[in-house]
Image (tube, helix red, strand yellow):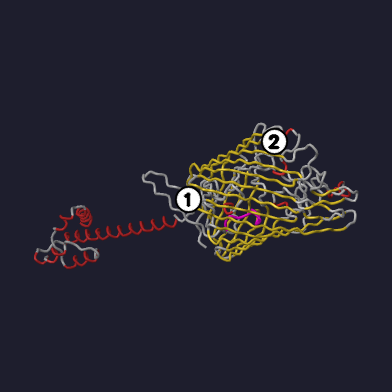
Amino acid sequence: MRFFLGCILAIALSVLPASTTAGTGANNGSSDAKSTTASETKTSPETPARADASAEPAKSNLDLEIEELRDQLQAQSELIKQQQNRVQALEEQLKASSSGREALSSSPAATPGSAVSSSAPAAAVNVVPASATIAALSPAPTPATPQASNAVPESPLQLRIGTAYITPVGFVDFTGVWRSHDGGSGIGTNFAGIPYGTVFQNNLSEFRFSMQNSRIGFRVDALVKGAHVIGYMEADFLGNNPGNVAVSSNSNTLRSRLYWVDVRKGAWEVLGGQTWSLITPGRTGISPLPGDLFYSQDIDVNYQAGLVWGRIPELRLVYHASPKVALAAALDAPEQYVGGSAGGPQIVLPAAFAAATPFSLTATSGVEFNNGQNVLTTPNVAPDVIVKLAVDPSPKFHFEVGGVERQFKLWNPTTLTKLSSTGAGGFVNLGVQLFKGFRLLTNNYYSDGGGRYIFGQVPDFVLRTDGSPSPLHAASTVSGFEYTHGNSFFYAYYGGIYVLPDVITDTTGKLVGYGFAGGPSSQNRTIQEGTLGFNQTMWKDARYGALNLMGQYSYLTRNPWSVAAGAPRSALLNMVFLNLRYTLPGGAPNLER
């Protein structure tokens, strides 16, 4: 009972003002020792009073126990304060570590000046291009802590499962397109096949709304045994649609675009999967991320006439000699091709093969080459080999040079012989920032049998009279400028394709191949496109996403090699695109190697 009362008194004494407790009588030697031990880091005003304790009468045992309990409570209060300080310090460290997040990955939607276009969703709000080759990503400032105590805490810019981070990527597009003539190809332009001559398409205009260019996907980042691993998946809604898709309900078909995994450790990097081909022009270094590539800022989902690109299965090896120099080699999925894809012209066959099923230009299977109709049935002999060297001495200058080597092989059913040939091509690309926000770009390509990489607007080869492939010569360019001023972005490009003739005199005396007098008007000599465009960012935030308004005007012409008497010398097309884009929020994590 005495102990119980003592506790009550001790609690009561502990809440008294400090001035009252300071004048409570003296303690004996043992109680002084305990008090000093309990709070040895504090300077107590009671010390002088206790020094004169011998002059006062001795206290009872109850008083001593109460005094001892009070001292113990003060000591415990001090320990609690110390623990609270430690917890606060740990919370600050945790907040600092969690702030290492990259505000945005790379996609043009959020910042028009980035490497993004209507087809570049790299990572959710892609505000600036990602670093050249998936090295460490730049951190972004941590959002301000809400002032109100009842504010909802902000979520991170990615999800975490185990030690891997998953970042949503994509955007929502609402696209409108008007063409002066009916192109008949949706929101993507078939440059080589625009209407020519006296046909209804050349006398009617075209207007269309679409959401097909919207994107959805994700990016996974993880550190695995010292290597930075990135998995990337991206899809749109430009897949093969049924004939009545636009009648009552636009149930557009989901289509895979990118699906790859990339592993980098130190200077070495390996990539495998469906990716932007190594032959696609880059903006910085050598990287598979969309924001690091150049495929124009056009809204047109087929980009710009003359652009060299591929989005195909590839195995790639990259050596980063330094942050400024990278060298890469890749094996790309091959496809020997004679025209017919995306409006591309077809070759004219020698008479001996015109009726042969293995050389059919219309069959969907059982053909020795891709005619634009057959699906995954072409007997390709070997992968295409692509090499590239990229040099970036400063952020204001990017230069790359490289080449491609291809193999073609056919079988003549009449002579029972195999016939082969080799194709090759080279490219030189350059990007230079002349002054703040203004950048000049030129991307140039010449090939002997590399027409498939010019968006299939040129066949790879023609057939000689013995059935052997003869690679077709072609050149292309996309050159222009891009200018960023605040939240506004402007661009202008010239794109051109030039195809040399490859004329074969048949055993019947007639001319066949490509580009001969009297040939089909689909066989083009030149295709040219001039484009002006803008991209206005209305708002953007890594936590909420971005909203952009985009516009494009293009003037497109094509000139056939053979023009009949009284026929026009060229086909012309005016195009206007408008696009409203909301880019998903999110940002890739900051993973140290």
Instruction: Please tell me how many numbered marks the rendered image carries.
Output: 2
Quadrant for residue 209, please give it: top right
The secondary structure type at the circle numbered 2 is loop
Q: Is residue 239 left or right of residue 26?
A: right
Dominant secondary structure, magenta: loop
**Of residues 579 and 565, the one drawn nearer to the viewer in this rendering:** 565
Count residues near mark 1 (Cα–Cα under 10 Å), then give few for <14, some for 14-19, many for 20+. Answer: some
Earlier-in-chain disc, 1 versus 2: 1
The secondary structure type at the circle numbered 1 is loop
Asked whether disc 1 touches disc 2, contact meaning CB atoms under 8 Å apart, the reply is no
Residue 373 in percent (x, y) is at: 77, 45
Residue 158 visible in image: no
Q: Is residue 354 left or right of residue 28?
A: right
Residue 161 in percent (x, y) is at: 53, 54
Where does label 1 land, which residue? 156
**Of residues 279 and 435, the one drawn nearer to the viewer in this rendering:** 435
Q: Is residue 61 left or right of residue 156?
A: left
Where does label 2 land, which residue? 182
The quadrant of the rendering that contains the N terminus is: bottom left
Q: Amino acid at mark 1?
A: Pro
Q: Residue at x 48, y 54 (%)?
A: 101
* Residue 200 to residue 38: above or below: above
Q: Residue at x 72, y 60 (%)?
A: 405
Residue 191 in percent (x, y) is at: 69, 43
Which residues make up the magenta segment? 276-284
**Of residues 323 and 429, the one drawn nearer to the viewer in this rendering:** 429
Q: Is residue 278 magenta?
A: yes
The residue sitting at the front extreme is: 566
Q: Is residue 180 magenta?
A: no
Q: Amino acid at mark 2?
A: Asp
Q: Is residue 324 left or right of residue 144?
A: right
